[in-house]
Image (tube, rainbow, N blue to C red):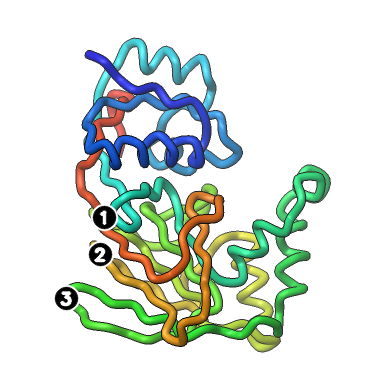
Amino acid sequence: MSALIVIGGDGTLNVAMTALIQAEAHIRIGVIPMGTVNNFATRYQLPTDPQAAIELICTQPATQAVGMLVCNQRRAVVSSLTFGNLADISNEVRQSEKQRFGKLSYLYRAIRHIGHNKSLPIRYQFKHEGSHTLKTWFCLITTTKSVGGHVYSASAPGKMHISLLNNIGWRQVIPYFWFALTGNLQNSKAITQLTATSARITSATGQAVTTRIDGDPAVKLPIELTYLTDRFELIVPAVIE
């Protein structure tokens, strides 16, 4: 049976799956992870060694129907959609800084943002739960309970995970540092966590807010997000959770 083989990380997968969504195509997918984080591959327990990934695709021991988050009915969200201050931080960190200092480079940039660029009132509209306007300093929306290998939320099959960092000032420095170093968003009073199958997100003030999808600059608010259950057939190891 034919299949689309994608070589790369979450960003490359985004391009491939976006094309399939726009073409309304349904085809079996094989992944050879070659990215920095490979969050999608980690979620579905795909081998990160290229040779092992190739062998898996050639033998095709099993397939699994996987869901996909879609933005504005046209663009896939393979791993994450973000907006706000921390989304800007990732764009500021230079490649040379990442190679030299690793995660500490992000922490340094994060410290510089404390006390600047206050929260924006963002309106979140959900199909069955009405509309909520919430202060948002940073928003992280993911298709899984983990990002970059860090488990930060409980499982919610068939739904997107929405985590809001409501504000950041000197009183929140310690939990903020913990988040910057570990990705752990749980049990923090500064965090609002939600799950949903669909959402419309707008800037309550009309201020321009640009999102990042799978690490790359993307569309501005307003956006509409829909989680499509069992959208793709993925080649996977024989037994996964």
Figure check: 61 above or below 117: above
Looking at the image, the residue that sits furthest to the left is 128
Distance from Cα at disc 1 to Cα at disc 3: 15 Å
Rendered location of residue 6, percent (x, y)? 43, 26
Q: How far across and how far down the image is residue 84, in percent?
A: 56, 71
Classify residue 233 as left or right of residue 153.
left
Using the image, tell me which numbered label, if any, was put on residue 198.
2
On the image, the x and y values in percent for residue 181 come to 65, 61
- Above or below, comparing residue 148 to residue 212 in the picture: above
Label 3's element?
loop
The residue that disc 1 covers is 227
Residue type highlighted by circle 1: Tyr
Asked if one can make out residue 189 in the rendered structure from this viewpoint, the answer is no
Position of 94 with respect to 124 (left or right) is: right
Secondary structure of residue under mark 1: strand
Crowding at mark 1 (Cα within 10 Å: few <14, some 14-19, many 20+): many
Whether label 1 touches label 2, CB < 8 Å = yes
- The kind of residue tagged 3 is His
Query: Mark 1 or mark 3: which comes first in sequence?
Result: 3
Q: Which of 94 and 204 is in front in this view?
A: 204
The residue carrying pointer 3 sits among few (fewer than 14), some (14 to 19) or many (20 or more) residues within 10 Å by Cα, namely: few
Alpha carbon of mark 2 to alpha carbon of mark 3: how far? Answer: 9 Å
Q: Which residue is pictured at 65% across the width and 58% down the height?
A: 90
User: x, y percentage for residue 159?
Assistant: 27, 59
Q: Mark 3 points at which residue?
A: 128
Looking at the rendering, which quadrant does residue 18 occupy? top left
